[in-house]
Image: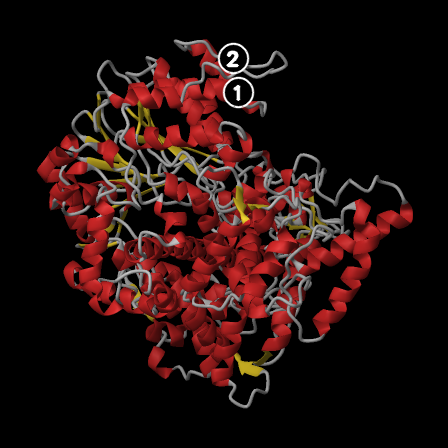
Amino acid sequence: MAPKKKEEPKPAAAPKPPEPEPPKEPEFNPAEVQIEFTAEQIEDFKDAFQLFDRTPTNEMKITFAQCGDLIRALGQNPTNAEVLKVLGKPKAEDMQVKMLDFDQFLPMHQHICKAKDRGTFEDFVEGLRVFDKEGNGTVMGAELRHVLATLGEKMKEDEVEQLMAGQEDANGCINYEAFVKHVMAG
Amino acid sequence: MGSGVTKTSEFNKRYDRDGNVIPAALTMKAAVMIQRWYRQYVARMEVRRRYTWNIFQSIEYSDLQDQIKLYNFLGYLVDNFTPSSSERNLISHIFRENEVCRDAEWERYFSYANIEVPDIYSGPRLSFPLDMAQVANLAEAFKNKQQLHSRYVLQLLLETWKLLRVLPNINRVSTCHSKEITICGDLHGQLEDLLLIFYKNGMPSLEKPYIFNGDYVDRGKDSIEILLILFAFLLVYPGDVYLNRGNHEDHIINLRYGFTKEVLKKYKMHGKRILKLLQKIFSWLPLVTVIDHRVLVVHGGISDSTDLSLIARVDRHKYVSAMRPPKKSSASRTNLYRPAVYDEMMISKNRRGSLMFPKPLGSRDSFQRRSLQNFSSTITRTVEEELEIRRRQSEFSLSSFSRSHQILNLSLSSESEPDSSEFTNTNNDEWKQILDLLWSDPMSQDGCIPNEIRGGGCYWGPDVTEDFLNRHNLQLIIRSHECKQDGYEFCHNRNVLTIFSASNYYEVGSNRGAFIRLGPDLVPYFVQYQATGMTRGLSFSQSMKRTEHTALKVLREQLFAHKSDLISAFQVFDKEKTGLISLDNWAAAIERVLRLDLPWLVLHAQLVSNTSDDLLDYHAWFRDLALKKPGCEHIEQTLLEALYRHRSTMETIFRIVDTDNSGFITFEDFRQTLKLLSAYLNIEISDEAVNELVINTDTNNDGSIDIDEFMEAFRLVDKSRLERGRSLLKFKQENQDLPQEEQTPQTAESAASQNVQSPDPKTSDSSDPQTADSLDSQTRDSPVLQRADSSYLQTGTSQDSKTAECSAPQTADSPGLQTDSPSSQTSDSSGSRT
């Protein structure tokens, strides 16, 4: 078969690169992060932090595994790789065991907030448009499922199912603008 | 292309419209982008799910405490009012001892023989002794919404009573002969769940033993049906069906949480007797079940003093209600129940910690002593007035509080059983043991502390579990009592298992139910389910949103009910009375007033509609929050607000006062009750106000007041729904398509459609001008709470609708809530079944 030339990703046209921006960046150092949140924002984060706090004595600590969820709940959408980076690249078995408190969490969150542009509605739609073969505003549900489960930071089958629940029409197609609105509106 | 193995890169090739291959890298990026967004979506949902759960639990527990507080207050009054005072007579009956009658006399009282069953009765007819076919038939009839005739009800209950009296306190079950035992948790009147369990698992039989772990009644709307089915099975298979008592198998709790009301409604003529008989039956339910000498099944849990050999010996039927210690004496009353009553001692900060992981409060003894002092000083203030009046009639004097306490007790004890003077601490211990079994909750820390959230029982830790299991040579504790998202949950290192069988407990889609199958290997096998057609086809996010919607609605009501207090709290921060407050202060003030320990900042986006900048206009916010129009402007706003806030308490008192359980109380009693309430709440209820309330309520003009009707008046209506309803009616009227009785966009199957959203057609003309007024008046700064008169828009049928009982916040006054039906319910979603 003829080899195909792979094009380099162009950030302008394509969705944002999944890797952290400078690939050879040194390890994340929380001490170097300047906290720029307002006091009110910090109070807000504390509230949310407490919702995830499952310690018996309400010590304001969460597990590493929850850190990503919390950052996302607060409005960011980092990749898993980004989350692991700010956590200091912990081992898989540490994720459920090791804890962090609010003061450790804050610089991580700040870094993610600052690190990149967050991606807009348009970026997301662009991403989906890649799969729109006919250019008619829909993508095949089956294809999307397959991609999500096999590429990138793979999703599990039930996660895919949950995401797509109720989105496909009778032909198995998804109108992706509506889909994006659905996901972003939550 | 050749044959052979498809390489991944080939497989993942994507082509665009013109047939060009899209570079894999691009595809990958697109995938990652979607995945990131998805994960954010999930995280946001999780946060919402959590705070929704927190909201429900906080309110549930805070309501439970209200109940305890009320009961203690009444108890205090009974102890301290003179015997002749009329208020005391109103309520003392609930504290009175079990009437000492012989069983034979009771059987006469409960006789069903001369209740005739008319020919037109199409429901099931029972003949005793029961057999399996009849029970299956009964279940089928209930499924078809039929009601069992009161004659058969009484007959069945009598037979049950006879059987229960010979059962031991501790049921002993064995899994020999390879029998699998099925264990079910709380059902709370949700018949659908019970039928679903039978459908999935088969009905009880010789080969299929069942253990039911208490809390069969209250909150759901089919409590009596559940009881009848369970009792019927018990009668047919007495060796294979085991019933444990739960904390809701208690007539005083039933007064507040809906069972009493349900029975009186369904059985207008004989309801009172049925309730009385049930009172006895509940007290005769066994306390725990032990499987194979290895597994303990109990409704609530244990404490560090739980002793099964003691439990085996008690006379369980003496403990009719958890709220009422076996004998009235200062010793017993000032026991564990007092500690629950104390506003000042409420753990203010971090109480969320105490819901799931309570904070230790110091040793239990100091705990009790402190609270008693606080309590009496509070009450002294409030009843001082009343007592002043009474002073002339008696020698009672506040200064000699403890002495008079004893005097009263002596005089009271003359009413009770002859051996009251022999009342010792043994009975007290026994009572506490039972309380612990039925009310306790597990916690993660070691130790054992009083359960101040529920007001009874304790929180026990993993060390207590281990100790208990070792002492009694057991390996597992199975308990219920707490709602769990997945229907079950392990804790204490898998030594304690909570099983909860009422799905959709807080709201449709809030949680699953589950039951356990236990074989001879004693390894639990779980089956989860979620009943109701409404959840079918709802995706997780849809059902989560519904639950959230209801939770927020409840929360808004709470906020509204505390309006005056909140405004005062806001003004502490807003001294210049600009009407503006920052978000942080808003959150702090709310927490100070409501004390629900919820994440207000996280919730703020949901509770405040225009989240513009950081300053909130709180007056405008209250106007947005709700709700009804003023019908009686002459009734003082704060009074109305206070009555609204305490409507559950008010209703409970009414039901207590309604000694013959008829659903009606006389004017005079009503007046007295309001006076009691005014003392309890420490608010002024003038005579004029009382008269006003009375006149507006007695629509029959027969000198008595229908409790349900009175409570109907204290309903809060969602303003936006009101407007939607009105505009819909207008639309219909303009188009004259549907008959005006028909409702709203709900589907016919939805019980909520019975909730009237649009005005009653007959009064539609007259009510429109009223609503126009109300809108105007709302723009002025005027009272928004209303005492409805009959022409008001919201005629209620909500008592009957499923959503009113099951999905409306169970903790709040159930008939009073206009349940909302979010539009997602109507869609026939093709999403996955939850």
Exactly how many numbered labels are in the figure?
A: 2
Q: Is residue B513 above or below residue A49?
A: above
Residue neighbourhood size for the residue with mark 1, other residues' Cα within 10 Å, grouped as few (<14), some (14–19), many (≥20): many
Q: Say which mark, if any, is on residue B149.
A: 1
- Disc assigned to residue B498: none
Residue B780 at least partly seen: yes
Q: Say if B153 sits above or below B38 in the image.
A: above
What amino acid does circle 2 point to? Answer: Arg
Task: Identify the secondary structure beneath mark 2.
Answer: loop
Which chain does the numbered disc 1 sit on? B
Instruction: Tell me residue B686's x, y (percent).
Output: 53, 66
Query: B588 or B613: which is nearer to us?
Result: B588
Q: Is residue B221 visible?
A: no
At numbered mark 1, what does the secondary structure look like: helix, strand or loop? Answer: loop
Residue drawn at 26 percent across, 16 percent down: B178
Q: Nearer the viewer, residue A4 or B14?
A: B14
Q: Going by the image, does B194 lie left or right of A94? A: right
Residue, disc 2: B125
Q: Is residue B316 above or below residue B576?
A: above
